[in-house]
Structure formats: C-alpha cells, structure tokens
Image (tube, rainbow, N blue to C red):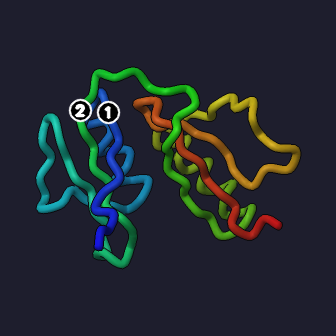
Amino acid sequence: MLTIGSLVLGVSDMSRAVAFWTAALDYVPRGGLVEDDWTVLVPADGPAGGVQIALGLSESPVQERPRVHLDLYAGDAADQAAEVERLLALGAERVDWDLYPEDPDFVVLADPDGNRFCVIDTSHG
C-alpha cells in the first residue's frame, strides 16, 4: 500500500523558502539539515502535526494556475483573516484570482517564490 511521503514545492531561493514555510507552518528542517538544493520540512510537534513538505531547488517558472497546490485550513473566518495577515507579514502575496466564486471560502496567496496556495475557512457553509 502506498502513502504520501512528502508534498514537494519547487523554489528558487532555498533559504528564503525555508524561512517562510517554517514560520508559516511551525515546521522545522528534518534532522536540522538545510541543503542548497533540497530540504525536507517536518512538523515541529511530530508526524501527527501534518505531512512533510520538501523544498527542491528549481528553475522552472511558477504556474499562474497550478494544477496542484496546498490548501491550508483555518477554523473560521476570523482565523482565516488573521492567518492571511500573518502570512502576508511573513512574505506571502495576495494573488489577483479571477476564478473566485461569488462567496468564496478561500483566499489565494503566493509564497515568496510565487507558489500559489489557499487559506480555507473550514466553517464556511
């Protein structure tokens, strides 16, 4: 049986990506190792805290409408708004997303490398 081992993000600046994602998710480099071309981040509180994220050095351009992206869950609208502001302060940027539905439960952001991700209000009806 297969299981998901890591979600992998391509990045152009490893130290910037490590700084952003460790602060955003309360993750740490696995084994304390940060390599120039590959770093695996794990939840600071252990495997029950979420799936590991691998960062791989990449020269590929960022996709404006990625086929795969991260969804980060917030408990409610207030939590979502607070998390969006926190992530923006860490270096994320708002994405001008033209595909928002009329009453969205998500906010599209991009990490400092331009990788798109969403912050979801999980209480949204």
Foreground residue, 11 or 101? 101
Q: Residue type at mark 1?
A: Val
User: In the picture provided, is 12 more to the left or to the right than 80?
Assistant: left
Q: Report the residue at 32% width, 46% height from top.
A: 8
Please, what secondary structure does the residue beneath circle 1 have?
strand
The number of numbered badges drawn on the structure is 2
Foreground residue, 73 or 85? 73
User: In the picture provided, is 55 more to the left or to the right than 113?
Assistant: left
Q: Residue type at mark 2?
A: Leu
User: Badge 1 local density, few (<14 within 10 Å), some, or many (20+)?
Assistant: many
Please, what secondary structure does the residue beneath circle 2 have?
strand
Q: Is mark 1 in CB contact (under 8 Å) with mark 2?
A: yes
Residue 57 in picture, x, y percent from top left: 23, 32
In the displayed orientation, state which residue is furthest to the bottom: 48
Q: Residue 26 got which mark?
A: none
Please identify the quadrant where the N terminus is shown.
bottom left
Residue 78 in picture, x, y percent from top left: 73, 62
Tell me if residue 54 comes above or below residue 46 in the rendering: above
User: In the picture provided, is 71 more to the left or to the right than 48?
Assistant: right
Residue 107 in picture, x, y percent from top left: 67, 46
Residue 108 in picture, x, y percent from top left: 63, 41
Q: Quadrant of residue 10?
A: top left
**Label located before the other in sequence (1 or 2):** 1
Q: In the rendered image, which residue does mark 2 sit on?
A: 57
Please identify the quadrant where the C terminus is shown.
bottom right
Q: In the rendered image, which residue does mark 1 sit on?
A: 11
Q: CA distance from mark 1 to mark 2?
A: 5 Å
Tell me if residue 116 comes above or below residue 60 in the rendering: below
Q: Report the residue at 55% width, 41% height from top.
A: 88
User: Badge 2 local density, few (<14 within 10 Å), some, or many (20+)?
Assistant: some
Q: Report the residue at 28% width, 75% height from top.
A: 46
